[in-house]
Image (spheres, helix red, strand yellow):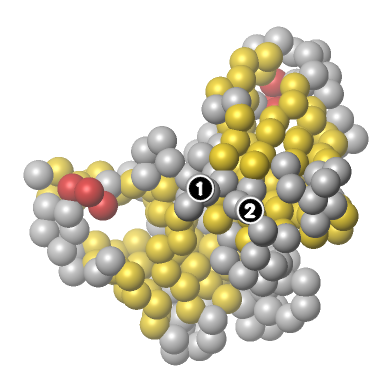
Amino acid sequence: GNSVTQMEGPVTLSEEAFLTINCTYTATGYPSLFWYVQYPGEGLQLLLKATKADDKGSNKGFEATYRKETTSFHLEKGSVQVSDSAVYFCALRRGGGSNYKLTFGKGTLLTVNP
Amino acid sequence: GAGVSQSPRYKVAKRGQDVALRCDPISGHVSLFWYQQALGQGPEFLTYFQNEAQLDKSGLPSDRFFAERPEGSVSTLKIQRTQQEDSAVYLCASSLEEEYEQFFGPGTRLTVL
């Protein structure tokens, strides 16, 4: 079946540090890949997505590239801010018909200190 | 505009009690989803509605879990005879159609004592 494995947290960084959160997946066919973010007390928000191999999703300074050869979708940001502190979830949605189910990783808690 | 809302935000139940969790999706969204998020885990799919039709309930963990969306808008997730293992955050999401972006509510945190 489909699964997502992401880097265990928590991750603690200083402001302006470089961030990488690793994510690998197992899926049949050609899934779409997502990063969601959950700020304290709020619902999950879509951060970025990529729908086919070699696509790069980007938003708010975050980037992730869909790598089919390594089945990965690592999240990166060049310079984190305190406001980026949140839980980050990698997720996939399988390709093909009736592809509405999202399969999530366990989440990675990021804390950015000033 | 208004996002997905859920109520209550927190619910404490004694083991064996029945609970009902409400989801108000974004107006006009055809698709509605329920997910369960256990502590330290990612959300897991429970069930999917297209308008009032429940098209997929493959993720419901037992027959104690029941969901409905009778008028194709508000949805209720009901858990009968709650057990401690039901303690989790229950997330509702809606989307314009099934393949579009899912917008999540803040969740209901259920604690079963």
Q: Residue at x 67, y 58 (%)?
A: B28
Confirm whether circles 1 and 2 share one chain: yes
Q: In which quarter of the image is the N terminus of chain A?
A: bottom right
Can you give x and y, in whole percent of width and height, for residue B37 in the image? 59, 41
In the displayed orientation, state which residue is furthest to the right.
B63
Q: Which residue is drawn at 77% across and 72% down?
A: A98
- Above or below: residue A110 compared with residue B86: below
- Above or below: residue B88 compared with residue A110: above
The residue at which mark 2 appears reads as B27
Query: Mark 1, chain letter?
Result: B
Label 2 Cα neighbours within 10 Å, binned few <14 / some 14-19 / many ≥20: some
User: Upstream in the sequence, badge 1 or badge 2?
Assistant: 1
The residue at which mark 1 appears reads as B2
Q: Residue at x 90, y 35 (%)?
A: B63
| Amino acid at dot 1 | Ala
**Is residue B77 among the parts visible in the rendering?**
yes
Whether pointer 1 and pointer 2 mark residues with C-beta atoms closer than 8 Å, the reply is yes
CA gap, disc 1 and disc 2: 8 Å
Task: For mark 1, give the secondary structure.
Answer: loop
Q: In which quarter of the image is residue B89?
A: top right
* Front residue of this view, candidates A47 and B105: B105
